[in-house]
Image: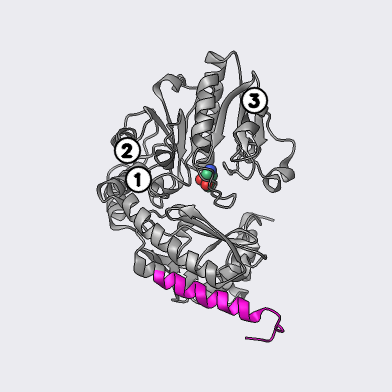
Amino acid sequence: MRLPDRLGKLNQEVQQLSQNDWQELEQKLFLRTVNRVPVTLVRGQGAWAWDDQGREYLDFVGGWAVNSLGHCPPVVVEALEKQAKTLIQASNQFYTIPQIELAQLLIGHSCLDRVFFCNSGAEANEGATKLARRYGKLRLNGAYEVITTHSSFHGRTLAMTAATGQGKFQEPYIPLPDGFVNVEYNNVEAIKRAASEQTCAVILEPIQGEGGVNVPDDDYLKKVQSWCRGKGILFILDEVQTGIGRTGTLFAYEQYGVEPDIMTLAKGLGSGVPIGALLARENVSLFSPGEHGSTFGGNPLVCAAAHAALKYIIDNDIPGNVKRVGNYFMTRLENLKQQFDFITELRGRGLLIALEFNKEIAEKMVLACLDRGLLVNTVKPNALRFMPPLIITEKEVDKAIGILVDTLEEIRNAKGKSKNAK
Ligand SMILES: *Cc1c(COP(=O)(O)O)cnc(C)c1O
């Protein structure tokens, strides 16, 4: 069909839809990669969001642990406005100031020495893997294999699908790129058993996010790091989800007494704008010009926003708020666990928390909470994940708990009753 005809047909179809039915339109136009929750968000401020019908929601999804400072934080909006009028994109052929300022802040507040900016978590982990392979080639006799863990999540590219130790993500795409070995999480011996002369690195999430908010034993990371150091193998932390204050310190590694050779960041780094970063120690920083790169990575607009967000987070001790309000939230959830016997587990740190049930009711909970004005995320068919903005208050936690109690009661009361029970 000629393009004007295709457009005409599409416009006709749109007119036949009920007014403003974005959701029906989406069903028609998109590759089916996600089951969306039936709400169209149009606006947000702080921990609150509004849909196209004007309904208000308390947002405990936070753009998937991205909106560190909530929706449309004034410091980020201001930085974006200013930078948008100044310089939006220049390419990495040139020096630009916002990315250098952001790099200074990141290096100054972490144990790493050098940074590379990209656009997403998957890309940051790809870069980390490539850097580990450079290290393997130049320092470890060509070792190239990377050990990762079951129920991890490292992103959606083909290589990161191989790194991500979850069958459901891997099976549709087999054969996957070579060079990754998936072993049990929270098990140092499993890593030792999987290692060979070909191993150049181990990549771990300090706390597994997408895999279900799995918190390892306190000494796990320390043991892995010490084994890696003994073998001369790189110890890489994927802090894409745990980084930038999410667990109560700027980086989660600070709480486990370790210092990675390479660290990746993305989600919360830009407080809403898409940015990823790969940070490395000096002795590991072995890329030569042309061996890695990105068109958009380090883009001035995005870096100005990320710099404003990160500076605010550091200057205002937002990780301190995460620790305090996270503990409060945890205590209130612990009470819920005592009240409802079908809650089997509560786990997490800071404001990365999961609530697990003895049955697959997470989807139902999401919809029931939505009806009452609370946005939450399913991390497993039987578990919810909470990742509210890091600026959340006790009062907002109280509001969320109230809604959770109502939905949990509804589910308990519906048990055994027929479907027409309201
Ligand atoms: C979300 C996530 C990724 C992937 O990030 P994208 O920006 O979606 O590519 C990688 N690692 C971890 C730990 C994540 O939570």
Determine the CA span between mark 2 and mark 3: 36 Å
Whether residue 234 is visible to the viewer of this picture, yes or no, is no
Q: Position of residue 346 (x, y in %)?
A: 53, 59
Picture quadrant of residue 306: top left
Residue density around tag 1, few if under 14, some if 14–19, many if 20 or more, within 10 Å: many
What kind of residue is marked 3? Ala
Magenta stretch, main secondary structure, is helix
Q: Earlier in the sequence, mark 2 or mark 1?
A: 2
Per the image, the residue denoted by label 3 is 195
Viewer-nearest residue: 419 or 217: 217
Per the image, the residue denoted by label 2 is 102
Badge 3 vs badge 1, beta-carbon distance below 8 Å: no
Give, as a single range, the part of the protein colored magenta: 398-422
Which of discs 3 and 1 lies nearer the camera? The answer is: 3
Q: Say which mark, if any, is on residue 306.
A: 1
Instruction: Examine the structure image and report whether residue 121 is included in the region drawn in magenta.
Output: no
SS under mark 1: helix
- The vertical placement of 401 against 222, above or below, is below
SS under mark 2: helix
Q: Residue at x 74, y 39 (%)?
A: 174
Q: Earlier in the sequence, mark 3 or mark 1?
A: 3
Whether residue 115 is visible to the viewer of this picture, yes or no, is yes
Residue density around tag 2, few if under 14, some if 14–19, many if 20 or more, within 10 Å: many
SS under mark 3: loop
